Image (cartoon, rainbow, N blue to C red):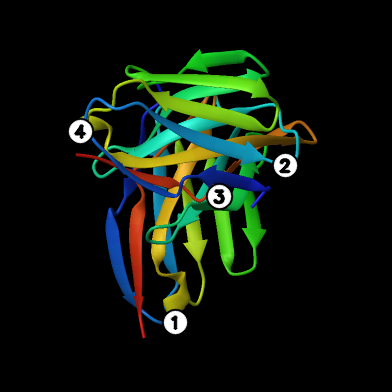
Amino acid sequence: KQEVTQIPAALSVPEGENLVLNCSFTDSAIYNLQWFRQDPGKGLTSLLLIQSSQREQTSGRLNASLDKSSGRSTLYIAASQPGDSATYLCALNGQNFVFGPGTRLSVLP
Amino acid sequence: DAGITQSPRHKVTETGTPVTLRCHQTENHRYMYWYRQDPGHGLRLIHYSYGVKDTDKGEVSDGYSVSRSKTEDFLLTLESATSSQTSVYFCAINTLAGGVNEQFFGPGTRLTVL
């Protein structure tokens, strides 16, 4: 059974910092990995999708990497802004989607 | 947002009453999902559908049933609501572009069972 963990559970940084969020998984038999953002009281917004054959994807200030052999993915956020404050979740697409518990990010002005 | 709506957005009901939540999509995607999100448990799959009248159970399906009579609508029913079913319920669809599955979510329904 796929198990997904995310470290740290919460993170608080000053504006402008670069930061890394981590996602670990136990079963490398996946089709792809997806990173989501969730604002309080809202649904999930898809940020990036990495196919199993890819190593990384970039969108603006976001860069996601995937290392299937070690069961890890990272989401790198450059030059963080207060508007980046949200919970970030990773999801592994194998037989079904399995979600991590999320990292709650606060970017302080 | 992949054209996904959920109704109602908020509902308060009493234990033992039936409740139906609706998910509607406008883009004819084949796969649709129902999840619940709870503190300490994250997102968990309740049921999913891979076509009209084709559904299957997820991780936490006990106490829930689903129906899909049209491509665009996926209904989640709590036959007799219990307080443990107080949660936020999300509907999602899978798009399949270039052989890649990607999930998109609706805005959620907050259900409180008293």
Q: CA distance from mark 4 to mark 3?
A: 40 Å
Q: Nearer the viewer, residue A88 or B108?
A: B108
Identify which residue is drawn at 46% across, 41% down.
B90
The mark lying in front, picked from 4 and 1, is: 4
Q: Which residue is mark 3?
A: A65
Q: CA distance from mark 2 to mark 3?
A: 32 Å
> Which chain does the numbered disc 4 sit on?
B
The mark lying in front, picked from 2 and 3, is: 2
> Which chain does the numbered disc 3 sit on?
A
Q: Which residue is mark 1?
A: A16
Helix, strand or loop for disc 4? helix
Residues marked 2 and 3, same chain: no
The mark lying in front, picked from 2 and 1, is: 2
> Which chain does the numbered disc 1 sit on?
A
Q: Which quadrant would the N terminus of chain A be assigned to in this image?
A: top left
Sort mark 3 into few (<14), some (14-19) or many (20+) by Cα contacts within 10 Å: many
First of labels 1, 3 by sequence position: 1
Q: Position of residue A10 (x, y in %)?
A: 28, 59
Helix, strand or loop for disc 3? strand
Tell me whether the residue at label 4 lies in contact with that at label 3, contact meaning CB atoms closer than 8 angstroms: no
Helix, strand or loop for disc 1? loop
Q: Nearer the viewer, residue A40 or A84?
A: A40
Q: Is residue A52 above or below residue B107?
A: above
First of labels 2, 4 by sequence position: 2
Residue furthest to the bottom: A109
Sort mark 1 into few (<14), some (14-19) or many (20+) by Cα contacts within 10 Å: some
Q: Which quadrant would the C terminus of chain A be assigned to in this image?
A: bottom left
Q: Is residue B57 above or below residue B95?
A: above
Q: Which residue is mark 4?
A: B83
Left or right position of B57 against B71: left
